[in-house]
Image (cartoon, grey):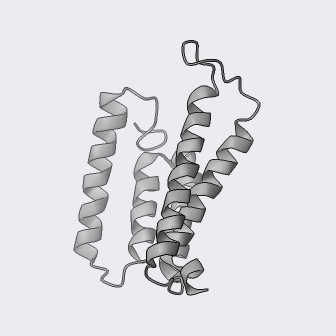
């Protein structure tokens, strides 16, 4: 029974599940042929590849065994999720800068080695890179600070 609760076996099952979900949501798309591909050709092919790799991982985990699963650490999972939700809620209402500050600030508390200087550095560097890439490089119509820029 411990082989079924190993990290590798559960990761393989997750790949198979993602492949099945992708097949389910893309079943209405026309597949077409190899020469004239429809919109469902690549998603279906990737789903089959994902399920195949997941099956191979499951078989290897059953044959060779791997590390047992440990209890989940809920603090990092919860804080990173809250950070992403705050980013999504703030992005359009306040702009990219406040959303990134909230994301990095909240998610940084998930780590036990929290250092204020490193968190502030991450906020500054991430904001500068996002402005350069998305606003200047790609020319996306997003506001850095709502109503200002």
List x then y, in percent, for residue 59: 52, 65
Residue occupying image coordinates x 52% and y 48% = 91
> 36 or 88, which lies in front?
36
Residue occupying image coordinates x 40% and y 60% = 101
Residue 129 in sight from this viewpoint: yes
In the image, 133: left or right of 95? left
Q: In which quarter of the image is the C terminus?
A: top left
- Up-down: is 117 above or below 28? below
Q: In which quarter of the image is the N terminus?
A: bottom right
- Up-down: is 55 above or below 43? below
Residue occupying image coordinates x 31% and y 80% = 114
Q: Residue furthest right?
A: 28
Residue occupying image coordinates x 54% and y 63% = 12
List x then y, in percent, for residue 103: 45, 61
Q: Quadrant of residue 121?
A: bottom left
Residue 85 in sight from this viewpoint: no
Q: Residue furthest front?
A: 63
Q: Residue furthest top?
A: 36
- Up-down: is 130 above or below 103? above
- Up-down: is 32 above or below 138? above
> 60 or 42, which lies in front?
60
List x then y, in percent, for residue 31: 66, 24
Q: Quadrant of residue 22?
A: top right
List x then y, in percent, for residue 88: 56, 52
Disc tally is: 0
In the image, 41: left or right of 145? right
Q: In which quarter of the image is residue 92?
A: top right
């Amino acid at each position: 029974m411990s082989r079924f609760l190993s990290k590798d076996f559960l990761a393989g099952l997750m790949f198979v599940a993602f492949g099945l979900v992708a097949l389910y949501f893309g079943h209405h798309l026309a597949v077409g042929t190899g020469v004239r591909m429809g919109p469902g050709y690549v998603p279906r092919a990737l789903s089959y590849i994902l399920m195949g790799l997941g099956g191979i991982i499951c078989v290897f985990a059953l044959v060779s065994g791997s590390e047992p699963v440990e209890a989940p650490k809920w603090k990092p999972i919860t804080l990173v999720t809250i950070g992403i939700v705050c980013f999504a809620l703030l992005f359009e209402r306040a702009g990219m800068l406040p959303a990134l500050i909230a994301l990095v600030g909240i998610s940084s508390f998930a780590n036990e080695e929290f250092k204020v200087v490193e968190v502030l550095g991450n906020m500054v560097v991430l904001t500068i890179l996002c402005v350069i890439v998305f606003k200047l490089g790609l020319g996306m119509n997003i506001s850095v600070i709502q109503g200002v820029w």
